[in-house]
Image (cartoon, coloured by chain):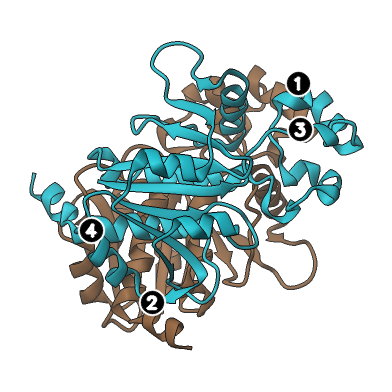
Chain colours: A cyan, B brown
Amino acid sequence: MLTIVLAESALETVPKNLWRHASVKRYSKKRKKHPRFLLLDRSYHHASMKTLTQSEKRGRPDIVHFALLEALGSPLNKERLLQVYVHTINDQVVRVNPEARLPKNYNRFVGLMEQLFELGRAPPNGPALLKVEPETLSQLLTQISPTRVIAFSTNGKPRTLKDVVLKFSSEERPTVIVGCFPHGHFSKSTIRLADEMICIDKETLETWTVISRVVYEYERTISLHLKRLKR
Amino acid sequence: MLTIVLAESALETVPKNLWRHASVKRYSKKRKKHPRFLLLDRSYHHASMKTLTQSEKRGRPDIVHFALLEALGSPLNKERLLQVYVHTINDQVVRVNPEARLPKNYNRFVGLMEQLFELGRAPPNGPALLKVEPETLSQLLTQISPTRVIAFSTNGKPRTLKDVVLKFSSEERPTVIVGCFPHGHFSKSTIRLADEMICIDKETLETWTVISRVVYEYERTISLHLKRLKR
């Protein structure tokens, strides 16, 4: 079983101090929703985001979308050997049911996330596929209780992914932290939570690229591809 | 050098016989563009698509979007060792400049593709990052002149990706064909063009999952990850 935590994810509703900004008001009118119920999205709110703290790490639901599609569509997840959590930059945690089939269309994904932040769960009725609660990364990790935590960063120790995965696949509850923001680095509080920081490429790789590689390498290490082909 | 061809991709403008359909007209009004300049998209034109031939394989620009992001963001592409072509279900071929940085936002990607189909190139001026021309998959392959063509399909021979890539990486111009449509199988004319059909998983994998795995396995086989870490 592999656990992946998307950390400091660029996923949040429009912060209150931006509600009166022209670009936000225009977007709110077009979407026919109050800004409190809308996702912050740099594609539409770029002009308003200049004054935000840590602005460069925020407002990119598209990264979360792709990262989740990569993880949930993998054979590892189909075998129920993968658990994914989304920790956001504002210390909320989204719990993702491995059976969730997320919309592939971006606008529908945004609608689903907005529903999630409004109601705390999605869909509104029946078994929850997504749940969100205020929670720090530290609290989440305490609950996961991993036997080893690896974080990926260009600031980490240079190692091949193969070696890293080979080593942690023998752990009982290995957990991987991948940053889910467009620019910048992990905060100090995130770095403190990792047993090891690893650099698998000197250039920053996209979040979804790291996820797809970790998952595939893990499948390869546990010979999942062979088991599935032989069925 | 690896060549990837996204085949029979679910990417096209709205076909003429759908222009008068209510869902298309509504969408056209909202987007303020004539349907001939709009991408067919099942998320918005589902109701109108029932009468289309091969309907289940069409109208999914999101799959092309994500597949291209996976390919172009890879270290292999950063090293200029990857060439990607998008062959569409209507026999058009999009040539993708490896230096192209595609929009990560879906709606912007759709806008770019619409510009591409309208003008034959994008951006309108300066060096072309994307070009589109009428061309069959057979014509494209004649031009690429591959030394070996592998196509991935659940109907193929069961083999591990590792073995497949190990074998073809010694080729001078290996070319991989990946279907870029949501359901169904390759057409007979596509199947005829492949030297070998390979099944790497008994369940259908998402196009972008296959792409990310092929690229990563190829990088691993040529030890690109080691070379990049040592710099």
Circle 3 — which element?
helix
* Residue matched to label 4: A169
Tell me the subunit letter for badge 3.
Answer: B
* Residue matched to label 3: B31
Q: Are marks 3 and 2 on the same chain?
A: yes
The residue closer to the viewer here, B167 or A153, is A153
Tell me how far mark 2 sits from mark 4, CA to CA: 41 Å
Tell me the subunit letter for badge 1.
Answer: A
* Residue matched to label 1: A33
Q: Is residue B144 visible?
A: yes
Residue B25 in the image: x percent, y percent?
Answer: 71, 23
Amino acid of disc 4? Ser
In this rendering, the label closer to the viewer, 4 or 3: 4
Image position of B138 with respect to A132: above or below: below
Circle 2 — which element?
loop
* Quadrant of the frame with the N terminus of chain B: bottom left
Amino acid of disc 3? Arg
Q: Is residue B195 visible?
A: no
Residue A165 in the image: x percent, y percent?
Answer: 28, 64
What residue sits 65% from the left and 49% below the top?
B109
What residue sits 33% from the left and 84% below the top?
B172
In this rendering, the label closer to the viewer, 1 or 4: 4
Tell me how far mark 1 sits from mark 2, CA to CA: 53 Å
Q: Are marks 1 and 4 on the same chain?
A: yes
Amino acid of disc 2? Ser
How crowded pointer 2 is (Cα within 10 Å; few <14, some 14-19, many 20+) is rated as few
